[in-house]
Amino acid sequence: MLAVIVTLSILPSLPVHAEPTERLHSGVSGSAAEDGSEIASPAGIVEEGQDLATIVGRIEPISPETKIRRNIAHATFCLPQNLLGVLYYGLLQLTGNVVRAAEMNEARVIVTSTPFGASLGKYIFIHTSMETEAAVRHEYGHTLQGYRHGPFYLLFEGLTSFVQAAIALCFPASAEGYFDRWPENEANELGGVR
């Protein structure tokens, strides 16, 4: 959650391309491009200021079967982070911090007035200043990481990301390589951020 300064200063400037996002746990893999072929890249990068519907519309769709498998995974294998996502989403709604939301594949992208980005299960939280395709893809990449590690996602990716962000806040010189280190670089790769 301390990733706010790092994310706000670095993520919006990252270029984006589309690629299949199906290098996941075999139980939840499968996509519209199951043959492994490259999905055509979008024509350019979404600039800041585009609406959320346009941004999520540029993310590769998944097949209905994959969506079902992933929703089952959220209710079982990925339950800890999904429960935290539900609780945090409810808290944001109670406090009036939800600006807008949109469905994207099996996930729900929530634009908030809280100053950070996070992925908790099927809930992707993006600050209004980070409402870009790169930020959505990056956080979706974290959602995809959750399928690999399931109940250990919070311990592996979550804790590691939090510690790296905290270090970047305390020592700004280390923020430069934030997205070059795991798990951030893997989230970028899975989400299609280049």
Image (spheres, helix red, strand yellow):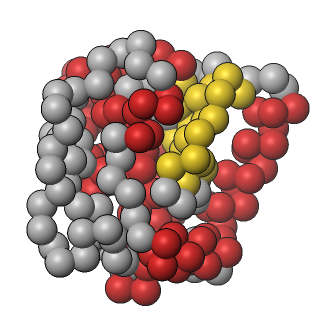
- The mark total stands at 0
Above or below, comparing residue 180 to residue 133 in the picture:
below
Q: Is residue 144 left or right of residue 21?
A: right
| 62 vs 150, nearest the viewer | 62
Using the rendered view, name the quadrant where residue 16 is placed: top left
| 134 with respect to 122 (left or right) | left
Residue 165 in the image: above or below residue 51 = below
Q: Nearer the viewer, residue 82 or 36?
A: 36
Placement of the C terminus among the 4 image quadrants: top left
Say whether residue 21 is visible: yes
Question: Among all residues in the image, which is located at the extreme bottom?
Answer: 27
Q: Quadrant of the N terminus?
A: top right
Q: Residue furthest right?
A: 94
Q: Position of residue 88 (x, y in %)?
A: 73, 44
Tell me: residue 172, above or below residue 145: above
Residue located at (38% from left, 57% from top): 61
- The residue under the point 58% across, 47% down is 103
Q: In this rendering, is residue 22 above or below 72?
A: above
In depth, the one of 144 and 84 nearer the eye is: 144
The answer, for residue 70, to whether it is visible in the render is no
- Give the quadrant of residue 101: top right
| Residue at image coords 36%, 15% | 48
| Residue 79 coordinates in the image, percent (x, y) | 65, 71
Residue 113 position within the rendered picture, expressed as x and y whole percent measured from the top left: 64, 19
